[in-house]
Image (cartoon, helix red, strand yellow):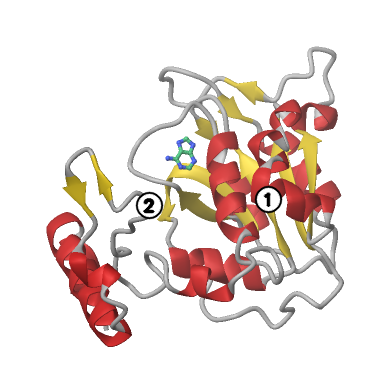
Amino acid sequence: MNGRNADMSLPGVPWRASVLTIFPEMFPGPLGMALSGKALDDERWSLDAINLRDFTRDRHKSVDDTPFGGGAGMVMRPDVIGAAVDFAHPAGDSRPLVFLTPRGRPLDQPMVETFASAPGIVALCGRYEGVDQRAIEAKGFFEVSVGDFVLSGGELAAMILLDAVVRLLPGVVGRRESVVEESFSSGLLEYPQYTRPQLWDGRKVPEVLLSGNHARIRAWRMEMALQSTRERRPDLLKNAS
Ligand code: ADE
């Protein structure tokens, strides 16, 4: 997962997402709207949602079974996952395989940038208590979490990851600066923003922003970014180079 992918997306070749899920009808969902939806229409990226049930072999179409060793819930079967991966990710496909799980590495902006530089991803969405670890290991899945909380499945997590990636693809966000200046790309939280009216509900816009002095504005914004980061996310400052 380190560094940029050598297959860095080629101009004119859409970034390609394949999502393995038991709820393909959840997609594109919110990704079909706004910025990501427009980018999908413009073929800057493509999305196919693949139904894991299509890779079952029994008449009940079971994707899961009880955990060895006992315990609550069900576990997704490795044979079903394996067959779906072989279909979605044939030999020669260099896209990374990503399994969305609260056990994964925490998603952050550098990771999002790495995925955006790849030709696409194949995302596996878990449900139930988890996925048989042999399938994760055998297929070489990179495990990613979107935060320290438990969702009822990986689908929303995959959407979060895809949304974050798609806005970085060439031509998706209009002004490049709006991606460069925002929270995390500098390692700091973003400074606060203000717009009209200048006086609202007895509250004024900070004077400096009306000064027209761009050097002062830049310095103030930097100070505010540092202050918010210190108060809200001191962990980011510790990690800053
Ligand atoms: N599936 C369930 N919870 C999740 C999380 N926090 N991140 C990624 N996938 C998940």
Crowding at label 2, few (<14), some or many (≥20) Cα neighbours within 10 Å? few
Picture coordinates of residue 79, whole percent (x, y): 73, 37
In which quadrant of the rendered view does residue 176 lie?
Answer: bottom right
Towards the viewer: 73 or 199:
199
Element type at mark 1: helix
Picture coordinates of residue 191, whole percent (x, y): 29, 64
Towards the viewer: 233 or 92:
233
Outermost residue on the top side: it is 60
Picture coordinates of residue 203, whole percent (x, y): 18, 46
Is residue 162 placed above or below 21 in the rendered structure? below
Q: Is mark 1 within 8 Å of ligand 1?
A: no
Name the side, left or right, on which 229 lies relative to 182. Answer: left
Q: Which dot marks residue 196? A: 2
> What residue did someone put label 1 on?
36
In which quadrant of the rendered view does residue 182 lie?
Answer: bottom left
Q: Residue flagged by tag 1: what amino acid is it?
A: Ser
Q: Which dot marks residue 189? A: none
Residue that appears at 67% across and 67% down: 169
Residue 240 visible, this angle? no
Residue that appears at 59% across and 51% down: 163
Residue that appears at 15% across and 66% down: 227
Q: Nearer the viewer, mark 2 or mark 1?
A: 2
Element type at mark 2: loop
Residue that appears at 28% across and 69% down: 210
Residue 12 visible, this angle? yes
Quadrant placement of the C terminus = bottom left
Towards the viewer: 239 or 173:
173
How far apart are the two marked residues, 2 and 1, measured between alpha carbons? 28 Å
Q: Residue flagged by tag 2: what amino acid is it?
A: Arg
